[in-house]
Amino acid sequence: MTAKPQRTIARPVTLEGVGLHTGEKSRLTFRPAPENSGVRFVRTDLPGAPFVDVRPENAHFDPGAGRRTILQRDGVQIHTMEHVLAAVAGLGIDNLVIESTAMEVPEPADGSSAPIARALVQAGFVTQDRPKRHIKVTRPVSWSEGGVTLTAVPYQGFRITFTIDYDNPVVGRQTLSLEIDEQTFLRDIAPARTFVLERDLESLRRAGWIKGGRMESAVVVGEHGILNPEPLRFPDEFVRHKILDLLGDLFLLGGPLLGHVTAVRSGHQGHVAFVKRLKQTLPLPGRRAGGPPEEWDITAILDIMPHRYPFLLVDRILGIEEGRSITGIKNVTINEPFFQGHFPGHPIMPAVLILEAMAQVGGLLLLHSVDDPNDKLMYFMGIDGAKFRRPVTPGDQLRLELRLLKLKNRTSKMRGEAYVDDQLVAEAELLATIVDKRPSS
């Protein structure tokens, strides 16, 4: 499996408009960003131009703030960015700086993501020299509350299935399932406009929301039809816009998702809660408290690796470039069971277990490339050119660096090197294959 490269825009582009809820005029400027930097909002209207990264720990939903998603970091907030993030996700953009002159980003003139997407397409795209860092659904994850349900399951690609059910004869119950890629986003999702029931308008205004709302910025739905002069763009435009909202909210994970997400009657509040659940459950980068965003902690490792005590020989992943390379850590302590016999009074880590630790880190790289790693195992097939430069003893920390040399079907060849501090202690080329954990009948 060859990983797709990361992507940013070719040149800056600016959009102006009015915040849907605050009614404040503002300007968004999209700028190219370097590889592996992710997506970041910058508040240029505040002293020092503070920023908020698009990451799940920065995602919030405030019931008192209306029907909007909020990003917040150190008191700095960005509101109602879901249509912007839907365009970023739908167009496959990985790295971007988005400068905003107000707390709330401007709402597109027609209440859809199409104007944002058109601007980004006109800016052009640049392919970057790093593979995409997918967030993979490795096992089923679900969240539900008050009749609202969201689930994600392993899937080869990215699909959203959404069901809405409104007590309104015009909207009613609609279900749609779409494979999400750039083409389907531009054609089937981006043009779908936000909508509001006419009966809810007054209560929204009394609550101080939708100060920037206009008839042309949303589909207003009465009991017998829509009140806008423009007809619906799709017969099921309502559920399409809900897919758009969910697509933007899912990008709060901080990168592109691989999986099949099913939503029933959900909104921004449920989406943010589901993103938090995904962060807690999946092997996402940055799971270690206080660690760099590229790291995986031991709970993330256990989500993928089948090994357990006493044979799990990797404690942390420092970084992974999908389909290319991985670096892991094994902390060597006197409590390792093999030191009881290797050797009493002179503990040395067996060389074969250094190779096993290498293989396990390499296995994470390979298993991360398949759709459902929980149903797969990695079999060690061969070793070439193994060399051991110095003993590894209690108190050492092994840094294990694996680089993929070749991958054909499910068989791989990797170059592995093990270091203590900056000293090379072992090296080898490893041959391995991925097999089904349960033989097919």
Image: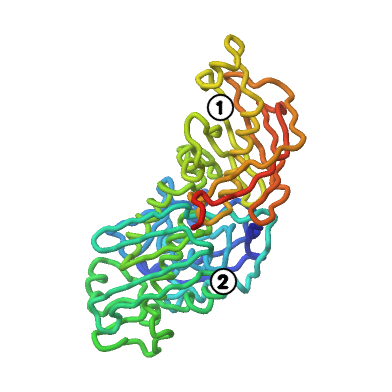
- On the image, numbered disc 1 is attached to which residue? 331
Residue 345 in the image: above or below residue 300: above
Q: In this rendered view, identify the residue nearer to me: 304 or 252.
A: 304
**In front of the other: label 1 or label 2?**
1
Alpha carbon distance from label 1 to label 2: 43 Å
Label count reads: 2
Q: In this rendered view, identify the residue nearer to me: 238 or 78.
A: 238
Q: In this rendered view, identify the residue nearer to me: 326 or 154.
A: 154
User: Mark 1 is on which residue type?
Assistant: Asn
User: How many neighbours does mark 1 have within 10 angstroms: few (below 14), some (14-19), or many (20 or more)?
Assistant: some
Q: Can you give x and y, in whole percent of width and height, for residue 410 in the image?
A: 63, 53
Q: In the figure, residue 425 lies in which quadrant?
A: top right
User: How many neighbours does mark 2 have within 10 angstroms: few (below 14), some (14-19), or many (20 or more)?
Assistant: some
Say left or right for 116 vs 388: left
Q: Can you give x and y, in whole percent of width and height, for residue 365 in the image?
A: 60, 46
Q: Can you give x and y, in whole percent of width and height, for residue 215 in the image?
A: 36, 82
Question: What residue is drawn where x is 66% and y is 53%?
Answer: 130
Q: Tell me, for residue 182, which label it has, or none.
A: 2
Outermost residue toward the top?
Answer: 345
- Residue at disc 1, secondary structure: strand
Q: Can you give x and y, in whole percent of width and height, for residue 180 in the image?
A: 51, 69
- Residue at disc 2, secondary structure: helix
Say left or right for 333 vs 196: right
Question: What residue is drawn where x is 64% and y is 21%?
Answer: 392
Outermost residue toward the front?
Answer: 441
Question: Does residue 50 show up?
Answer: no
User: Mark 2 is on which residue type?
Assistant: Glu
Q: Earlier in the sequence, mark 1 or mark 2?
A: 2
